[in-house]
Amino acid sequence: VVRSFDINKPGAPLKSLNGGVVGGTLIKGKVKAGDMVEIRPGLCYRDGTYSPIFSEITAVRRGAEQPKCGKPGGLYALGLTVDPQFTKDDRMVGNTLGKPGTLPPVFILAKAFIKRLRVDLHEKKLRPLRKGEIIKVV
């Protein structure tokens, strides 16, 4: 998910409210209105646990078009039945969507090995990293 938002206007009547919307690129498979999806990691709690969200797709959009289904390679906006409070203000950015039970597990901890590259060839010795220094991970 690269974007997520709430399309409802403040003060809209209850009957006209829509679910949340997520946007991103479809990598494989197809999606259409009526499909059930799982969103992971979903809700993340302060204790480090998470709870996936299950929702139904209500609409598929690509720009101004409303195709019958979404196919790999395009940017799509998917209307969902999920409460818009979860999607407003890009709150779902970084999540993944898929058919229920097909998404990979969520990892809380990752181990990385860092090799620093010498940027300045005149530098004799690499200085240690400083606290708060920004590093680029590739």
Image (tube, rainbow, N blue to C red):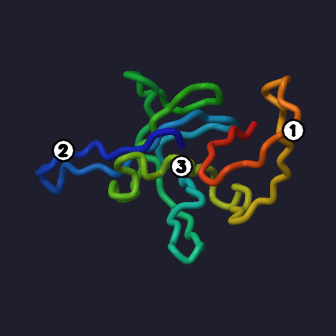
Location of residue 51 with respect to 65 vertically, above or below: below
- Apparent side of residue 89 relative to residue 37 in the rendered image (left or right): left
Q: Is the C terminus in the top left, top right, bottom left or bottom right quadrant? A: top right
Give the residue type that dot 1 points to: Lys
Q: Is the N terminus in the top left, top right, bottom left or bottom right quadrant? A: top right
- SS of the residue under disc 1: loop
Q: Position of residue 77 (x, y in %)?
A: 45, 35
Q: Residue 11: which disc? A: none
Label 3 to label 1: alpha-carbon separation: 57 Å
Choose mark 2 or mark 3, whichever is in front: 2
Q: Is residue 39 or residue 56 the one in the foreground?
A: 39
Q: Label 1: few (<14), some or many (≥20) within 10 Å?
A: few
Q: Residue 35: which disc? A: 3
Residue on which the image places disc 2 = 9
Residue on which the image places disc 1 = 125
Label 2 to label 1: alpha-carbon separation: 58 Å
Give the residue type that dot 2 points to: Lys
- Residue visible at 56% across and 54% down? 37
- Residue visible at 48% across and 57% down? 55
Label 2 to label 3: alpha-carbon separation: 26 Å
Give the residue type that dot 3 points to: Asp
